[in-house]
Image: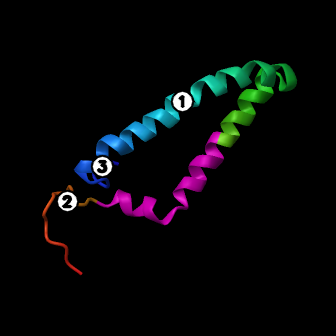
Amino acid sequence: MQREVPAEYQGRVFAIDLMGSLGLMPLGMALAGPMVDIFGERQLLIGVAIFHIAICAIVLLVPGVKEMKTSRPPYSPGAAISS
């Protein structure tokens, strides 16, 4: 992500990313207990694993993700943009 985000926006982008990751943790913890009561431990873990695999597969379908695999020069402010 650092290669894709201009340096002047990295602080904001990483703050939003961290806020989303850490901010949703209490919600996940609050839902974990009732979900275990409803589905049981084994079924919940299997369901969460399937959900996680599905989300990863969906992310791989986003066109920009494949472009991130290629090696690109790091962002440099003031670099000439060719078209």
User: Is the Cβ of the residue at disc 2 closer than 8 Å to that at disc 1?
Assistant: no
Other-residue count near label 3 (Cα within 10 Å), few / some / many at <14 / 14–19 / ≥20: few
Query: Residue shown at 39%/37% (left/top)?
Result: 15
Q: Quadrant of residue 35?
A: top right
Farthest right residue? Answer: 38
Q: Which residues are magenta?
A: 52-70
Describe the element under mark 2 as helix, strand or loop. loop
Residue behind mark 3 = 9
Percent across and percent down for residue 51 are 68, 42
Q: Amino acid at mark 1?
A: Gly
Which residue lies under the disc numbered 1?
Answer: 23
In space, the residues marked 2 and 1 are separated at their CA atoms by 33 Å
Q: Residue at x 60, y 55 (%)?
A: 58
User: How many other residues sit within 10 Å of disc 1, few (<14), some (14-19) or many (≥20)?
Assistant: few
Residue on which the image places disc 2: 73
Q: Residue at 37% of width from left, 40% of height from top?
A: 14
